Image: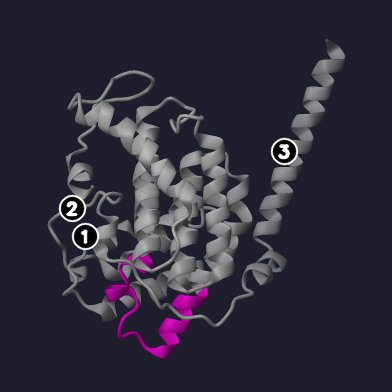
Amino acid sequence: MILKSSLNQINEFFLFLSNHLRKFYLHSSIYNKKISKINDRTLQYTPSPNLLDCLVKYNKKKNNIEDYFINSLWTNSKLNKKDYEKLHNFYWLFSIDLKSSKKITQSIISNWIDLNHNYNQNSWEIDTLSKRLISWISNSQLTYDEGSKDYRDKFNNIIKKQINHLINEIGRSELVNDKMIGCSAIILTGLSYKDEKVLNYGLKLLKKISDVSFDNEGFPRSRSLRQLIFYLKYFVLIRELLKESQNEIPEYLDENIYYLGQAYNFIWQTNKTSFLFNGNHEIDHSDFVKYL
């Protein structure tokens, strides 16, 4: 008993030491140099805005970028963790009117890059970073179009630097949802920059997620209905991205969507309600039904 306790304490010590050494490495100039190795590819494909409608929950009333407190956007130290993540994942760009000033929007992004161009544990967390990449690329009409050459170079470089970090770290995440969102961001970036290396990595990761997450009947191993619709949304999105960008759609992706869709149709379309068990709660899926 004493020996077992001592071994547990030793293991905890080495785990603690390993985590701290890794944090030190991620903030080091060595790691920064590693993820700063980028190519000169430019943004070539951006998805149609309606492809993200099934994923992003945002205010249907469009706002003007001029309505935001531009000068204090990144200096507010009173934000709680949830609001901080919402600010830095840039999903609020989906609620910005496309008639808003591109110059102001790009100035906000440029300021963010100046303050966060190196790895930061909070603003570079996998979920936040992945959503930021999706938002920046998907809202290119505001974030990229008509930008100066210097700004576009700056934008392209930070996209690739974040992708390098995401590819390095996503395998360490224990959260399946983060892996799925990160995988989507990697695939979108590979398609957008016509980078086969990045795209192939994303597709291999998607296949791995599929093999681990679903049983032989194509149902999530977690048996969670919320997980089912989460996977279905992202798998549909990825298929539509591949289709729109005229890339081949893997057979397993269509197969997963078929089985997930069958289960979704049986549970929600037939019963017109959500089953409240195994951690599920009542959810309005009407927007997703319209999307499909």
Q: Please, what is the three-letter code of the amino acid marked with disc 1?
A: Ser
Q: Please, what is the three-letter code of the amino acid marked with disc 3?
A: Phe
Q: Is residue 207 above or below residue 95?
A: above
Closer to viewer: mark 2 or mark 3: 2
| Label 1 neighbour load within 10 Å: few <14, some 14-19, many 20+ | some
On the rendered structure, is 32 left or right of 224? right
Which residue is painted at 30% across and 71% down in the image?
A: 71
User: Colour scheme of this structure image?
Assistant: one colour
Dot placed on the residue nearer the N-terminal end, 2 or 3: 3
Q: Where residue 224 appears, x then y in whole percent?
A: 40, 27
Instruction: Indicate whether residue 93 is drawn in magenta.
Output: no
Q: Where residue 74 appears, x then y in whole percent?
A: 38, 64
Dot placed on the residue nearer the N-terminal end, 1 or 3: 3
Q: Residue at label 2?
A: 59
On the rendered structure, is 152 left or right of 37? left
Q: Please, what is the three-letter code of the amino acid marked with disc 2?
A: Asn
Q: Secondary structure at mark 2?
A: loop
Magenta stretch, residue numbers = 136-157
Contact? badges 2 and 3 (CB < 8 Å) = no
Contact? badges 1 and 2 (CB < 8 Å) = yes
